[in-house]
Structures are given as C-alpha cells and as structure tokens.
Image: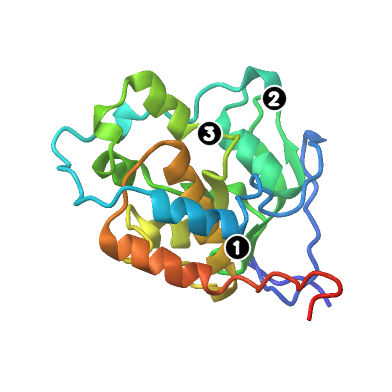
Amino acid sequence: MSAVLLSGVLSTAAPLTASAAVGAPVRQAAAASMPTPITAAAARTALSALTVATPRSMAGYSRAKFPHWMSQSSAGAGCDTREVVLARDGQAVKRDAECRATSGTWKSLYDSRRYTRAASVDIDHMVPLANAWRSGADAWSTQRRRAFANDLTRPQLIAVSAASNRSKGDQSPDQWQPPARGYWCLYARAWIQVKKHYALTVTAAEKTTLRQMLGTCPAPADPAGAE
C-alpha cells in the first residue's frame, strides 16, 4: 500500500519510504534512539533520593540563559545539537552541505506519529528548561546551563512531534504525560535520571506521578529456578 502523506505526516499503517534528496545519508539509527535511561529499579531508588521542594520563582528566567543548539563540529561542518539529534533519532536521514536534514523518517514516541519532514519535528528537552530553572538551575552558571540544554550523553534530548512538544511545554509529569501510555515507563526513567544527574528538585505531586508512571514498567523476569 502506498504511504499517504499529509503535511509531512505519514499514516502509521503506511510503509516508510524516505524521499530522495540532495545530500548523503547519515549513519542509520533506530527511531528515537536517545541514550537508554536507567532501569526501572534504579529509577525507583533515584526517585526516593530526589529532594522534594516547592518550585522556585521564574523571576529572571529566559531561554537565552540556556544556550542551546550549540555547534557539534565533530558531527560535521555546520552541525549543531538539533541536527545531531535529528540524524540520531531518524531513519534514512539525508542532510545538505550545511548539515540540515533534508529527508528521512521520524517516529514521535510521545504520540506514535510518523513524519517525513524535519520541519514537523521538534527536539524536546526531556526536563524542560523552565522546569529546570524552577528546580535549581536558576543558581547555575551559564556553562552548566549550556551543558544541560545540549546534553547528548543522557536521555535529555529526543525528536518528537511539534504538536506533542508544544502541548507539553514546560510541564512536569504530574501536569503532562505522553499521550502514548506505552511510553510512560521510559519517560519516567529518563526524567528521573536527568533530575538525579543535575541534582534538580521535584515537587511532591511530581514525585507521586513519577512513581505511578514507573508502575507501568514490565515486571522483571523471575530468575531461573526461582520458586
């Protein structure tokens, strides 16, 4: 069956065939292949250790205080963090001489939508910049905020649909969860790992919801021979 393309969105029932474009294909990767978060067991332990606090003031906040989409010259001339994530999280991605993605396919795990236009995809900060500000980043140096906003080592950046990213905004898990419930386990594990690494606080409601979301994780397999 031929894929039906509407404004860059592919029907999930249609085969995924990347359109031809000028440029060379980048290294192939599984869709949404951000770094694998810590295990559910490790996330439960980390969640228990996170500091619970009321949100700090938004006074003085600006996205400009989190310099993002910094140059990633090791990925190629002209590449920045956004283009690195697009290449990493997409399939059959091709880019032009300025490192901009010109074709490929992307699956948004937040809402199970598929796209063939990079312009239809946003790079989401798992823990939003404004949430981080309210959780302790207001006291950070600009250098640390830059590292947070461009973190490719931890599960902090992921390519998702623009619609889901904008619906999420700067909300914490008690205020917004991915529409695709099957992604809740991975989402909670990633959120907790990032907050733990950066020593960010959580609210009581946020902690409760994260615990509930971890409850959707598959139970660990019984060890062989266990009764």
- Vertical side of 44 occupied by 179: above or below: below
Which quarter of the rendered picture does the C terminus lie within? bottom right
- Marks 3 & 1, CB-CB < 8 Å contact: no
The disc labelled 2 sits on which kind of residue? Ala
Outermost bottom residue: 227
**Which amino acid is tagged 1?**
Leu
Residue at figure coordinates x 69%, y 69% from the top left: 220
**Disc 3 designates what residue?**
151
Residue 200 numbered tag: none
Residue 112 in view in this figure: yes
- Please state the horizontal and vertical placement of residue 88, each as a whole percent of the image: 69, 42
> In which quadrant of the rendered view does residue 175 lie?
bottom left
Residue located at (28% from left, 52% from top): 52
Contact flag, marks 2 and 1 (Cβ < 8 Å): no
Q: Which residue is mark 2?
A: 75
Q: Which mark is residue 109?
A: 1
Disc 3 to disc 1, C-alpha distance: 19 Å
Task: Please report whichever mark, 3 or 1, sits nearer to the chain's N-terminal start.
Answer: 1
Residue closer to the observer: 24 or 169: 169
Judged from the image, the secondary structure of the residue bearing numbered disc 2 is helix
112 left or right of 18?
left
Measure the alpha-carbon separation of dots 2 and 3.
15 Å
